[in-house]
Amino acid sequence: MTFGALRIAQKDLNIELRTRERMTSMVLLSLVIILSFRFAFFGFDVNLTGSPELVAPILWTTIFFAGLVGLESSFSYEKENKYLDGLLLLPTSRFSIYLGKMLSNFLFLVVIDVMTVVFIIAFFAYDFGGDILTLFLVLLLGTFSFVAMGTLISGMTMSARTRQSLLQIALIPLIVFTVVIPAVVATSTVVIGSGDLAPDLRILGGFGILSLLLAYLLFGHILEG
């Protein structure tokens, strides 16, 4: 991680601490999704402990849609305030700009990971028990892969008038089979306590590395185009 990337991530974090727009939207959306699942599946009877197979789909559906909201705003500040040219004039590589944006997006989504786990514990009375550390390993790896590709696609769609819908159209097919399904399967393995984590973790890690490689090759052209 270069110094330029850290400065860009710090800038994004400072803006978010001042405005709180992105995190507020993401946290509220995650809460709404969790409550929707809570009352749709169980009404007023909490019974998720007896249905551990539902934990992973609920968890990753919430993270996925909250993450989309965060990625839609990834370059909005520079675009709306016409600061993109200033970003390009920074004495750092184009890939460092990508890394800085990816780091800030990753940190935002990690907060959502934690909040979603807390919401599940609170509203479903579910006890992750001793699996919580392994669960967070899966969450961090899945979040990394999601954000690595999502930041690249966000950069590609930032100039489009309908960038929000275009981001979803471009990103969803790319990550459903490469991130969401392996993450759900790995999380189910952790929660249920049976199965092999390694294949799904390899898929998540490999896709994240592939996304970084694509960003290294393409992100400079994306910004200049």
Image (spheres, rainbow, N blue to C red):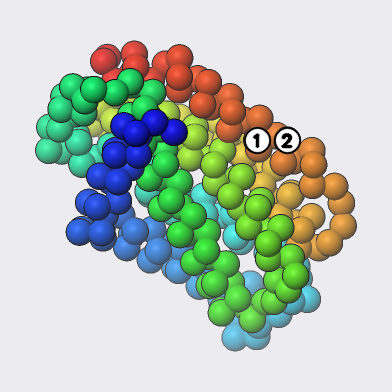
Position of the C terminus, as image quadrant, is top left
Q: Amino acid at mark 1?
A: Gly
Q: Is residue 36 visible?
A: no
Return the residue nearer the eye: 214 or 133. 133
Three-letter code, disc 2:
Arg
Along the horizontal axis of the image, is 113 left or right of 101? right
Is 83 placed above or below 88 here? below
SS category of the residue bearing label 2:
helix
Residue 85: x %, y % from top left? 16, 24
- Characterize the local packing of mark 1: few (<14), some (14-19) or many (20 or more) Cα atoms within 10 angstroms: some
At a point 19% along the width and 34% down the height, the residue shown is: 79
- The quarter of the image holding the N terminus is top left
Instruction: Give the residue at the far left of this rendering.
Output: 81
| Label disc, if present, on residue 78 of the rendered structure | none
Q: Residues within 10 Å of mark 2 (few under 14, many from 20)?
A: few
What residue does disc 1 label?
205
Residues 114 and 10: in front is 10
Measuring 38% from the left and 23% from the top, which residue is drawn there? 95
Q: CA distance from mark 2 to mark 1?
A: 5 Å
Q: Name the residue located 25 percent from the left edge and 27 percent from the top edge.
A: 159
- Residue 223: tell me if it is visible: yes
For mark 1, give the secondary structure: helix
Q: Position of residue 145 (x, y in %)?
A: 56, 38
Tags 2 and 1 in contact by the CB under 8 Å rule?
A: yes
Rendered location of residue 189, percent (x, y) = 79, 55
Which residue corresponds to mark 2? 202
Q: In this rendering, is residue 137 above or below 24? A: above
Q: Residue furthest front?
A: 3
Q: Is residue 80 left or right of residue 20?
A: left
The total of numbered circles placed on residues is 2
Give how far across and how far down residue 63 sits, in percent: 52, 54
